[in-house]
Image (spheres, rainbow, N blue to C red):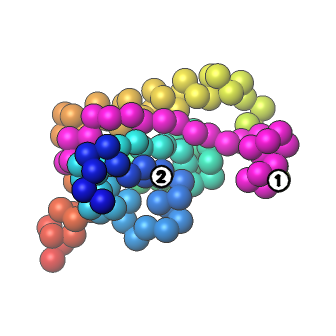
Amino acid sequence: MGSPNLKMMLDTYHMNIEEDSLGEAIVRAGDQLGTFHIGENNRRPPGRGHIPWDEVVAALRAIDYDRDTVMEPIVHMGGGVGNLLAVWRDMTDDRDLDEAAREGLEFYRGKLAAAETGCAGPPASEAKEGHS
């Protein structure tokens, strides 16, 4: 499009379904990534599923991502969002949602901090080069 005001939004839940490599998709987006949504493969907060977070944060670091990140766990049946997305079971594990969100945020911040210190794994594209 060529517009400096038009950016991409990526979301780990949908990337988990559609992408072969989350890290490679983030690196491909590069400076066109304007907003990043985080959530697990099961729509729970980060740290409660199997998203490859080290790969994700290493890729974000590789592109110097410093824009908005939004956590969007969807764990309740019913209501506008739960009905729209056909959430068919309570996924809260009888936990307070505010506490679960805080834990997810702490988990994600810990992964970001590890990437800053070099403790997280490399983006998938770099990892593949090392295994060739």
Q: Which residue is mark 2?
A: 12
Q: Is residue 46 left or right of residue 7?
A: right
Query: Which label sits on residue 109?
Result: none
Q: Are marks 1 and 2 in contact (CB under 8 Å)?
A: no
At 19% from the left edge and 34% from the top edge, which residue is drawn?
117
Q: Position of residue 62 (x, y in %)?
A: 19, 48
At 77% from the left edge and 45% from the top edge, which residue is drawn?
82
Secondary structure of the residue carrying tag 2 is helix
Dot 1 or dot 2: first in sequence order is: 2
Query: Splitting the image into 4 quarters, where does residue 118 fall?
Result: top left
As measured in the structure, the alpha-carbon distance from the residue carrying label 1 to the one carrying label 2 is 21 Å
User: Where 125 sits versus 109, above or below?
Assistant: below
At 43% from the left edge and 67% from the top edge, which residue is drawn?
19
- Tell me if residue 71 is in the magenta stretch: yes
> How many other residues sit within 10 Å of disc 1, few (<14), some (14-19) or many (≥20)?
few
Q: Is residue 56 left or right of residue 74?
A: left
Query: Splitting the image into 4 quarters, where does residue 116 fall?
Result: top left
User: Where 47 sits versus 42, above or below?
Assistant: above
Say whether residue 123 is visible: no
The span picked out in magenta is 62-87
- Tell me if residue 80 is in the magenta stretch: yes
Q: Is residue 73 left or right of residue 119?
A: right
Q: Position of residue 42 (x, y in %)?
A: 63, 52
Callout 1 amino acid: Trp
Secondary structure of the residue carrying tag 1 is loop
Say whether residue 13 is visible: yes
Q: Which residue is mark 1?
A: 88
Q: Position of residue 26 (x, y in %)?
A: 32, 55
